[in-house]
Image (cartoon, helix red, strand yellow):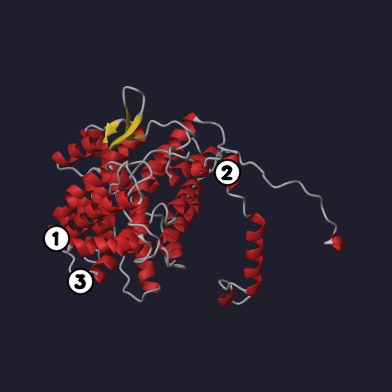
């Protein structure tokens, strides 16, 4: 088979796919008949309880005296500590917070000054890749998709690890800390290779400074001149902290638990979680926000005209504009309704970065879309619990102002969430001991085998 044929969808494949759909489609009413929780959620959107965790907790409802649960302002807790208090602490101390947050999520307690300094040294020492890995893996066959390249790189690291299959806790901790340290390099180097070999751009490979924070390292590795402002690094650091963990029930973290429960190695587990995060329903929402905002600006004659803006947002909701999906991206969340605490914290810093970048008018438009969309969605969808922006609404705008391309948005999410995955992997190893195996009910009637000559 010739190379160009590998990606071809032939008439034979089309016919087979139609046959597959014809013989694999399940009657939707059966899900109600057997009370199947599709997406592991009940009719009210509440997740099915499949495990316990001490790593993080999301609070979006409060219980009234009569026992009724009602929506409330969202709260996020890392190891029992309110995320807003955690951030306020390192901001007041003029510290980068991602490393401190990583320590908290992994080890269950806040580090003192000495422990934090030693942990940062440890991360800096591991912030390298094996000899010749850049040449033999990253440069050998660069991928056009950075998430694909990141997954491949992680799988290849298995070959460089003499204890790759050892799932004892000390060894898994070592592997996780290495991956947390290596992700910025794997992301930036794979992007540099992609831009050179697929886009014809110049190739530059910056060497990481082990004394820099993770956020500083990302900017230093990504930019040819290795330069960045203090505010840029602080805002990126904040974004990493807010993306590091979000309960055990999100799709990629649940994947971490499932694969870990099978006894698989760390590299395979992380790659499975990366595959989950790559899906646009999970890790790509902020890209859609940026694209939607560009579309809105392109179609408005006067972005300051709220009436014109509401008219276009209505067209988006009516599937008559943008991608015709009927969604205003960055609005609403599966759990939060009154407010997403991550969005609230991030928004408090977006304005400062917009001012530094001279993009105040765009930021004003974001705020206007947030206000108008919340009202329109509530009215058109008859949602009474409230609709608020989620973290994706502003995170893409931040990355755009930092000069980061859209193909790096989800990999940057991964560079943060690898911390949460690592913590949950070790929690699963410590506490579970049983393979996760949910039940699926067969609903096709029994039928006899038909001999070849009678078919």
- Residue 154 percent coordinates (x, y): 45, 53
Image quarter of residue 361: bottom left
In terms of depth relative to the viewer, which is nearer, 61 or 149? 61
| Circle 1 SS class | helix
Alpha carbon of mark 1 to alpha carbon of mark 3: how far? 18 Å
Residue placed under numbered mark 2 in the picture: 31
Instruction: Give how far across and how far down residue 252 sits, in percent.
Output: 44, 46
Quadrant occupied by the C terminus: bottom right
Residue at point 38%, 65% (across, down): 323
Residue located at (35% from left, 70% from top): 195
Tell me what residue is drawn at x 23 percent, y 62 percent: 309
Name the residue that disc number 3 marks: 301
Compared with residue 149, is residue 271 higher up or lower down, i.e. above or below? above
Disc 2, SS:
helix
The answer to which of marks 2 and 3 sits earlier in the sequence is 2
Quadrant placement of the N terminus: bottom right
Q: Which residue is mark 1?
A: 360
Precedes in sequence: disc 1 or disc 2: 2
In terms of sequence position, does the residue under pointer 1 or pointer 3 come before the other? 3
Q: How many numbered marks have been drawn onto this rendered protein structure? A: 3
Tell me if 227 is positioned left or right of 340 in this view: left
Residue 415 placement (x, y as % from top left): 35, 51
Q: Which mark is residue 249?
A: none
Distance from Cα at disc 2 to Cα at disc 3: 47 Å
């Amino acid at each position: 088979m010739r190379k160009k044929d590998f990606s071809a969808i032939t008439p034979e494949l089309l016919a087979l796919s139609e046959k597959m759909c014809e013989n694999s489609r399940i009657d939707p009413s059966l899900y109600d008949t057997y009370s199947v929780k599709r997406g592991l959620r009940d009719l009210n959107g509440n997740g099915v309880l499949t495990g316990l965790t001490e790593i993080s907790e999301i609070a979006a409802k409060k219980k009234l005296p009569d026992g009724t649960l009602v929506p409330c302002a969202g709260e996020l807790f890392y190891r029992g500590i309110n995320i807003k208090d955690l951030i306020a602490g390192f901001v007041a101390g003029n510290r980068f917070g991602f490393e401190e947050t990583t320590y908290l999520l992994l080890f269950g307690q806040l580090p003192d000054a000495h422990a934090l300094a030693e942990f940062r040294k440890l991360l800096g020492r591991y912030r390298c890749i094996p000899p010749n890995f850049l040449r033999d893996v990253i440069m050998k066959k660069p991928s056009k998709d950075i998430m694909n390249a990141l997954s491949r790189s992680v799988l290849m690291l298995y070959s460089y690890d003499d204890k790759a299959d050892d799932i004892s806790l000390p060894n898994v901790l070592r592997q996780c800390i290495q991956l947390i340290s290596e992700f910025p390099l794997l992301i930036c180097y794979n992007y540099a290779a992609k831009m050179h070999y697929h886009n014809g751009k110049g190739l530059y490979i910056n060497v990481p400074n082990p004394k820099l924070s993770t956020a500083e390292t990302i900017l230093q590795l990504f930019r040819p001149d290795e330069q960045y402002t203090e505010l840029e690094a602080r805002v990126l650091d904040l974004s990493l902290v807010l993306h590091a963990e979000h309960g055990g029930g999100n799709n990629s973290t649940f994947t971490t638990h499932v694969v870990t429960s099978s006894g698989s190695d760390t590299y395979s587990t992380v790659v499975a979680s990366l595959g989950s995060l790559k899906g646009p329903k999970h890790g790509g929402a902020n890209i859609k926000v940026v694209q939607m905002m560009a579309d809105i600006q392109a179609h408005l004659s006067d972005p300051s005209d709220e009436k014109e803006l509401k008219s276009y947002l209505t067209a988006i909701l009516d599937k008559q504009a943008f991608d015709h999906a009927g969604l205003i991206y960055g609005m609403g969340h599966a759990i939060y309704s009154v407010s997403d605490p991550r969005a609230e914290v991030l928004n408090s810093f977006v304005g400062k970065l917009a001012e530094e970048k001279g993009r105040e008018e765009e930021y004003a438009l974001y705020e206007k879309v947030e206000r108008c969309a919340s009202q329109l969605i509530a009215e058109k969808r008859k949602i009474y619990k409230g609709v608020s922006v989620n973290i994706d609404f502003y995170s893409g705008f931040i990355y755009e102002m930092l000069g980061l391309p859209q193909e790096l948005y989800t990999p940057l999410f991964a560079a943060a969430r690898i911390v949460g995955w690592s913590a949950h992997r070790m929690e699963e190893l410590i506490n579970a001991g049983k393979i996760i195996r949910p039940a699926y009910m067969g609903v096709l009637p029994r039928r006899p085998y038909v001999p070849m000559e009678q078919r």
